[in-house]
Amino acid sequence: QVQLVESGGGLVQPGGSLRLSCAASGSIFSIYGMGWYRQAPGKQRELVAGFTSGDSTNYADSAKGRFTISRDNAKNTVYLQMNSLKPEDTAVYYCNVEGLTVWSQRFDSWGQGTQVTVSS
């Protein structure tokens, strides 16, 4: 069983910054994928930023130059630093972690979601 706990969402004015955190815990043997997604009302969930193989990262075009994904492997934690926030960034943000459990089973877990609202 793998659990993800997100934190860091909230209300921020346009141009402001927020940092999201997502900590994974449980029967984790290894992690090979970590990412952040978001879902705005009436829209599909979309990838914001993620780690692919190794330390490679990919970003949605809307996030490039403003958002930075990072991780602390020792803490099984992934972060999303969001700068220059815009009203269109308003959404529920979800973290996603994929890996192997100590029983060699693959897992694909999602966080509970954290609301980010960008408004004046």
Image (spheres, helix red, strand yellow):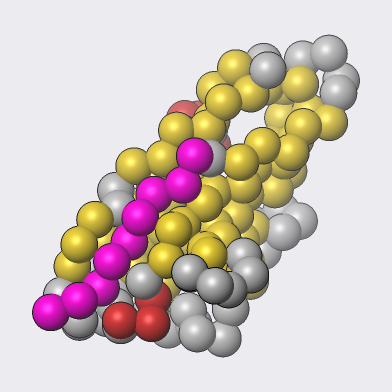
- On the image, the x and y values in percent for residue 110 come to 61, 41
Q: Is residue 63 above or below residue 10?
A: below
> What residue is shown at x 30% (from left), y 81% (from top)?
87
Pick the front one: 100 or 41: 41
Q: How many marks?
A: 0
Position of residue 4 measured from the top left corner of the image (x, y, whole percent): 52, 32
Furthest residue in direction front, as rendered: 42
Q: Residue at x 54, y 48 (%)?
A: 95
Left or right position of 85 against 3: left
The residue drawn where x is 35% and y is 55% is 115
Magenta-span inclusion, residue 115: yes
Q: Is residue 27 magenta?
A: no
Quarter of the image with the C terminus is bottom left
Q: Is residue 118 left or right of residue 113?
A: left
Q: Is residue 22 visible?
A: no
User: Is any atom of residue 99 visible in this view?
Assistant: yes
Stretch of the chain drawn in magenta: 112-120
Quadrant for the N terminus in the image: top right
Work out whether 23 lies above or below 37.
above
Q: Is residue 2 above or below residue 114?
A: above
Residue positioned 53% across, 40% down in the render: 111
Q: Position of residue 50 (x, y in %)?
A: 61, 61
Quarter location, residue 88: bottom left
